Image (tube, helix red, strand yellow):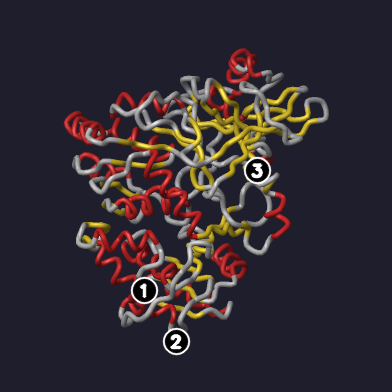
Amino acid sequence: MESLPLVARARGHGPRRALVDAAGTYSYDDLLEASARIAAALLGHRSDLEEARVAYFIPPSFDHIAVQWAIWRAGGIAVPLALSHPRAELEYVLRDAEATIVVADGDSASMLEPLAASGGARFLITKDALAASPGPLPAVAPPRRAMMVYTSGTTGKPKGVVTTHENLQAQITTLIEAWGWTADDRILLVLPLHHVHGIVNVVCCALWAGATCVILPKFDAAETWARIASGELTLFMAVPTIYSRLIAAWEAADPDLRAAMSAGCRAMRLMVSGSAALPVQTLERWREIGGHTLLERYGMTEIGMALSNPLHDERRPGSVGMPLPDVEVRLVDEQGKTVVPGSPGEIEVRGANVFLEYWRRPDATRDAFRDGWFRTGDTAVLEEGRYRILGRSSVDILKTGGFKVSALEIEEELRTHPAVGECAVVGIPDLEWGDKVSVAIELRPGASLSLEEMQAWARERLAPYKVPRALCCVAALPRNAMGKVVKPEVAKLF
């Protein structure tokens, strides 16, 4: 009898199509067999991995999911490695997690095997693990640790966020209910699989529901539009930057192709945006192109998803909606007292979805909770029953001239300038103002804008946000591997 509900449900889905990747199409039975073989290879002569950390470096694919399931079925803790990380960061994660086994695809073996050896970990290639003969698997209780995803937050070294099988089940089932997943759904994965957005929201929800997940090894605008235009998908989930790139690709396409792209969007039942604030102009443009008001939601590595706009009711631009089923949310001031609606406060979350601990960081784990509530470090305001995110308390909430202002709100206003393509707002320490609000701007193609023109425009438009003075530098903004704008270092602004 299978002890993990996610895996046990797969037996009921049996011959149904589960995963599609560049190599082929795979049923739930295929996934069960492959993960059983890999689990046997991971176990070796052991009967249970007993929460040993197993790190894996595999592009999004059937093999990636099979390895993840194998780790869980063998009783280990899955530690997904970021394909975009340089060697030093991979070494750090392997060392910090004290990984005892490292799994990689054949193309990555030359890089990963020496890293595994340096940490004394056993190294496996996926192809070899798939050749193992299935054997007895341990009973894995829901309270056991299941996964460790590394997140740096805003300060310090990355921390391993440990979730249990119970946590994962809570995160999955709340989304199944809130977003109406069924076995007839077909979703496209274009996200990396070292974040909960891709792991939980897309893959785990699809496999729990008995649906089909079509996997791209990485995001490609043309290939993504081709899949959407096929009309075969029912769901799509991505970050705002991906939607911006899809908009640009749509605008560059010929009219006939545009019509097919838009028709494919309209054939879907749900399109979701998350992991970063969605600019209102992006939401509105996507609605024009695809007929969907993107569903915005709020979550983080430590909690999965906590807030979501409704599936069927009104979705308000700039809002991340209401608490998901079985998730408690409150806003508190710096003393931990609940704030009244309309006043900004830190988001705190409580529920079965909340993670267990930061790996071997008891002080950080203790400091992350207040009376059983997880302190997210994000500031929001509750308006007419809906939450609106103002930003990270440590980065996006600037204290300037005696006022607290939201960098995200200022960025949203700046994007209304016709020359501004993208922007990032930071605070520079200043003896007079506390934080001097500073802006880095990326211009739209063909646009021009002087520093003086931007300052004059900003002084007028930003007055309602209590910004005493805006400084800016017209420059290309740094982006991460997914193309998302990241907050520039202060030194790079001037």
Mark 3 vs mark 1: in front: 3
In the rendered view, tell whether residue 189 sits above or below residue 10: above
- The residue wearing badge 3 is 375
Q: Earlier in the sequence, mark 3 or mark 1?
A: 1
Q: Quadrant of the N terminus?
A: bottom left
Earlier in the chain: of badge 2 and badge 1, it is: 2
> In this figure, which residue is indicated by the disc labeled 2?
45
Q: Position of residue 196 (x, y in %)?
A: 47, 51
Position of 219 relative to 85 (above/below) = above
Q: Disc 3 vs disc 2: Cβ atoms closer than 8 Å?
A: no
Q: Element type at marker 2?
A: loop
Res 477 → quadrant: top right
Instruction: Kindly identify the residue that appears in the image at 28 percent across and 44 percent down.
Output: 222
Residue at 46% across, 39% down: 325
Q: Is residue 129 above or below residue 353?
A: below
- Residue in view at x 59 percent, y 72 percent: 98
State left or right for residue 361 relative to residue 355: right
In the visual, does 184 lie left or right of 412?
A: left
